[in-house]
Amino acid sequence: MKRKKIRPFSEQIYNLRELQLSAYELYARRHGLTVKEFFVLHILWFSENGCRQSEICERMSTTKQTVSAIIKKFLAAGLLTINTSESDRRNKVIHLSDKGIAYAESIILSAMEAETDALDELSGKEIMELTRLTSIYSKKLKDKFTVSSDRKAACDSSD
């Protein structure tokens, strides 16, 4: 397909991504959270063995400072525990505390229910196709942005 014809689809995909993100932002706000705080809770909820701050940063594609501020806020509220990793004592593993589990449970489970309800309105074939195509597009987009960033870094270093 010619680039000129592709552009409207690209804009539509961008608008759909914004629509999804705004749904999460509204949901998070209703629970007194920012969308990034919600995503940190979501990651920790599904991390049975906890996870490192660097893993959260990588999964969310956000800065260490942003995640650190969220972790400090959640620690102060008693929602998290931080333990030294048994395999590498230099690493700290973050877990939801009992209070954090109780707090996150209704927020995360309710969000999961909404996501499941939305997908349930599609056929099994549509869900598989949506997942397949979103996965392909997301990987290709990440690759293109990575190559673009690498080129920019190379140009900047040659100045």
Image (cartoon, grey):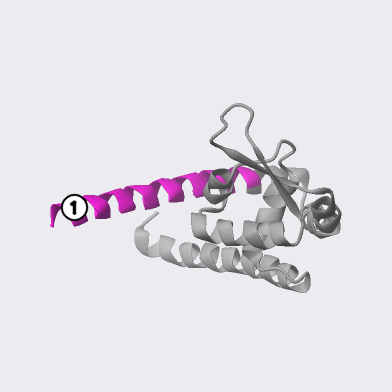
- What segment is highlighted magenta in the picture? 131-159
Does residue 143 show up magenta in the picture? yes
10 and 56: which one is in front?
56
**Residue 50 place in picture, x, y as percent:** 69, 40
The residue type indicated by label 1 comes to: Ser
Q: Is there any visible trace of residue 62 in the rendered image? A: no
Does residue 99 show up magenta in the picture? no
40 and 142: which one is in front?
40
**Residue 5 place in picture, x, y as percent:** 41, 63
Task: For the N terminus, give its image quadrant.
Answer: bottom left
Q: Is there any visible trace of residue 61 in the rendered image? A: yes
**Looking at the magenta stretch, what is its main secondary structure?**
helix
- Residue found 56% across the figure and 37% down from its top: 91
Task: For the C terminus, give its image quadrant.
Answer: bottom left
**Residue 25 place in picture, x, y as percent:** 67, 69
Is 85 above or below relative to 43? above
**Residue 116 place in picture, x, y as percent:** 80, 52
Q: Is residue 11 left or right of residue 113?
A: left
Residue on which disc 1 sits: 157
- Residue found 64% across the figure and 70% down from its top: 22
- What secondary structure is marked by label 1? helix
